[in-house]
Image (cartoon, grey):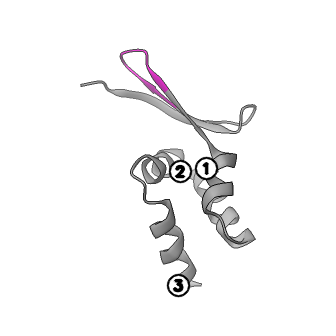
Amino acid sequence: MKKLISCEYNMDLACVELKYSDGTMIAIDTIAVENEFAETWLDRRELDYLIYNDPLGYSELVLNGDVKAYLDTVRQGQ
C-alpha cells in the first residue's frame, strides 16, 4: 500500500497535488472541478476555501466523487 507523503495546492498550476511514497503523483485540476460542479459564486468560494485551507479534505471529496453532495449540503445550510 502506498503512503501519502504530501498534499498541497500548487498555485502556479492551479491544482492540488498528492504525492505518494512509491513516487506516483495525482494532480487535481481545481479549475476543471469548479467548472463542473460550482453553480454559483458561493459554491466557488466554498471550494476555494477548501483548496487553500484543507487541500487533503478537498482531494478526498474529489477522489471519492462527493463534490456535488458536499455543495448541496453547504447550500442547504446557507
Residue 24 inside the magenta-drawn segment? yes
Q: CA distance from mark 1 to mark 2?
A: 6 Å
Q: Residue at x 32, y 26 (%)?
A: 3
Which one is nearer the viewer's eye here, 60 or 33? 33
Height in image: 56 above or below 75? above
Q: Which quadrant holds residue 17?
A: top right
The residue under the point 51% across, 51% down is 58
Above or below residue 30? Residue 8 is above
Name the residue that disc number 1 marks.
51
Q: Callout 2: helix, strand or loop?
A: loop
Assign a secondary structure to mark 1.
helix
Return the disc, 2 or 3, that comes first in the chain's sequence.
2
Q: Which amino acid lies under the numbered mark 3 shown in the image of this protein?
A: Gln
Which residue is rendered at x = 69% and y = 47% of the image?
31
The picture quadrant where one finds residue 24 is top left
Type of the residue with mark 1 = Ile
- The amino acid marked with disc number 2 is Asp
Is label 2 or label 3 in front? 3
3 relative to 24 in the view: left or right: left
Which residue lies most toward the top here?
A: 23
**Residue identified by numbered label 3:** 76
In the drawing, what numbered circle is on residue 54? 2
Numbered mark located on residue 10 in the image: none
Q: Position of residue 37 (x, y in %)?
A: 60, 61
- CA separation, marks 2 and 3? 21 Å
Q: For marks 3 and 1, give the CA distance.
A: 21 Å
The boundaries of the magenta stretch are 18-25
Q: Would you call the spot at circle 3 few (<14 residues within 10 Å), some (14-19), or many (20 or more)?
A: few
